[in-house]
Image (cartoon, rainbow, N blue to C red):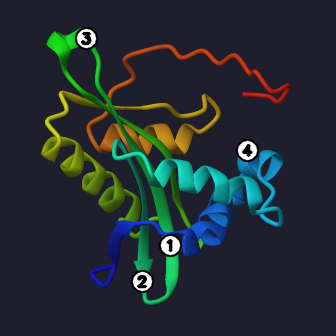
Amino acid sequence: MTDIEIRRATSDDVPAIVALLADDDLGAARETPDELAPYLAAFHEVDSDPKQFLAVAERGAEILGTLQLTLLPGLSHRGGTRAQLENVRVAAHARGLGLGGRLVSWAVARARQHGCRMVKLTSSATRQRAHRFYERLGFGASHTGYTLALDGGGP
């Protein structure tokens, strides 16, 4: 997969990103790819925030992966900034080819460029394959996460 470009997403990428988010058991139950208006509104909010990076991995004209990187300044860790990874997805037909590792490496490099002290991520307790993937990349299970759904939906 040497012909992959990882770049900042544009609004034209939103349909493909939403399709990636919907392409698994959890996403299929919560995403609605045929109703793009809320996703486009969210995209514009994310894209206008300099501490947010919504990235896509593209080969030719096909979006094969995505992730969101958020820079979180804080007082803990001597005022250090943390990076938070969310929504890491790779198209089903491109899994196992190293693309997920390249995406995460890209995000870690960007976090380093911004002086972050750590990169954190959350992953649903049901995603055992994803947990093994993150552990292979050097991430450790260090916290227990909790979710409080505010919109009546599930976590």
Lower sequence index among marks 4 and 1 = 4
**Residue projecting furthest to the bottom:** 60
- What is the distance, in whole Å, between disc 4 and disc 1 at their CAs? 19 Å
Which amino acid, by three-letter code, is at mark 2? Arg
Question: Counting other residues with Cα less than 10 Å from the Cα at mark 1, is it few (<14), some (14-19), or many (20 or more)?
Answer: many
Residue where numbered disc 4 is placed:
26
Between 47 and 58, the one nearer to me in the picture? 47
Q: Looking at the image, do the residues carrying marks 3 and 2 touch, with CB atoms under 8 Å apart? A: no
Residue where numbered disc 1 is placed:
64
Question: Counting other residues with Cα less than 10 Å from the Cα at mark 4, is it few (<14), some (14-19), or many (20 or more)?
Answer: some
| Quadrant of residue 78 within the rendered picture | top left
- Vertical placement of residue 106 versus 155, above or below: below
Which amino acid, by three-letter code, is at mark 4? Leu
Q: Looking at the image, do the residues carrying marks 2 and 4 touch, with CB atoms under 8 Å apart? A: no
Q: Looking at the image, do the residues carrying marks 4 and 3 touch, with CB atoms under 8 Å apart? A: no
The N terminus sits in image quarter: bottom left
Does residue 100 appear left or right of residue 150 in this picture? left
SS class, disc 2: strand
Residue where numbered disc 3 is placed:
75
Q: Which mark is residue 59?
A: 2
Q: Which mark is residue 150?
A: none
| Quadrant of residue 5 within the rendered picture | bottom left
SS class, disc 1: strand
